[in-house]
Image: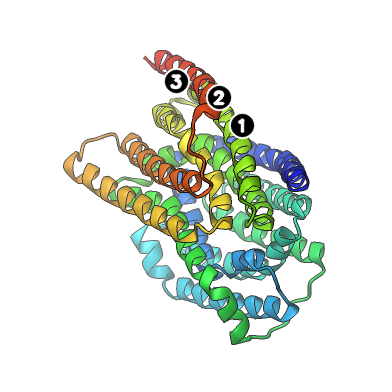
Amino acid sequence: MANILKTIIHGLVTSMGLRVISMGLRFVTICLLPFWMSPWDIGLMALILACVNLPVALADFGFGTSIIKEKQTSERMYRSVFTFVMISSALIAAAIIIGSPWIESAFALPSGLAILAAFALPFNGAAIVPNAILQKDLRFTNLAVRDLIGEVTFSGVSLVLAIQGYGALSIAIAVVAQRLIRWTVASVSVQWKPVLCLNRDDLRQLSHFSFFQFLSLSLAQIFNQIDKLLLAAFLSPAALGIYSQAQQFTVYPVQSLSGTANNVFFASFSKVQDDLETLRTLMTKILKGLILICGVIVAFLAPAMHLIPLIYNEEWGNVVPVAIILCAFLPAFCAFIFEGIMIAIGGEQRRVVSGVIKLVLLVAGTVGVFCMFPGINGPCAMAVVFGCSTLIAAINNLCFILKRLEIRSVRPFAGAIALALVLAGAGMSLSISLWY
């Protein structure tokens, strides 16, 4: 257990260190873009990212993660997955291009944006196998470097084009450039040469795990993007921009770090997936640390949201209440770092169930709220529905892990929970008092 714990700590420290730098660049970009882009443009930006990220989750059908989980892999298996993913990516990209007039009309996107965003898919598909090899070999530093270089590319391209007045188009171009760079860096890191080769036996061997992984990843991406699409159906792009910017200031940093931690936890826990005692000990240590981190994040982040109208103008002041609401649900978003652990210990089916619950609650809650209360503050209402849906799904996931690892007592976590509640409560109280 000492060796695997050391690997996890090293992977987290290295990955998180570089990821914090990447997040810093993205956060600076998020903070600077409103100087040259209006809430309307930010809303269009959110729709563009939704149009890219949603198909990306569907393109690999879970085979990338299956490679990491599989104990015995071969070069032929890598090539089969690569071929399959490239075919599916090309088909999805073609469908977006063909349907671009409808997509742009339905969501009031400028002409050509959907077509441009579709070009990100093949580059993302080509990177799936190199990324999986890096994770399987526990080469977290290489993954973090890949993310950092990709983030530098995204931030540089989007800022330069935004300053030049390209508006939402700058984001579409930046996304394509980012995917291209990430694929290039990952491929160079593993020195793997792609070859087209489709073997049914290899895909069938991976399909049992990949099927549930595909469902859970698809549900997660739909959940993360559909709130923007639903909001766009009821409100203007400007209101969507307010909601999206509040997410960028609060939820995005947590989701970004959670994704990095998930990569480390999934690859590391898969190595000891049959050792219950080791898994239980590791989970206890991680959970205690996460509880304290959540309290600190909420305590500092919630009051900081009041700086938004001081930095920009009153047009962006409406972001503050939305951001404070999302801060209250940050522990639920943090809890999703356990998804990597969950699938490593055989919880892929339960993860799908949680995804379905979360998505149904989000859609039903959004439609119900906006139909029953048409005059409600849209961004704030969306934040509440989004947060509640996430909280319920996070509790469901955590209960499964604790039951599976036979962790029945909360006494080891009592001190961490008490301190986290004090910190989070103080931060939320201060933020609310400042607002009123």
What whole-number distance in Å separates the C-alpha atoms at marks 1 and 3?
A: 21 Å
Please determine whether, in this image, residue 175 is positioned above or below residue 91: above
| Residue 289, label in figure | 1
Relative depth, front residue between 377 and 276: 276
Q: Which residue is mark 3?
A: 428
Task: Specify the amino acid type for callout 3.
Answer: Met
> Residue 299 at x, y = what percent?
53, 21
Cβ atoms under marks 3 and 2 closer than 8 Å: no
| Residue 416, label in figure | 2
Q: Is residue 402 left or right of residue 243?
A: right
Q: Which residue lies at the image location 63% right of the left edge and 86% below the top edge?
A: 199
What whole-number distance in Å separates the C-alpha atoms at marks 3 and 2?
A: 18 Å
Task: Specify the amino acid type for callout 2.
Answer: Ala
Q: Quadrant of the C terminus?
A: top left
Q: Is residue 112 visible?
A: no
In primary-sequence order, the first of circles 1 and 3 is: 1
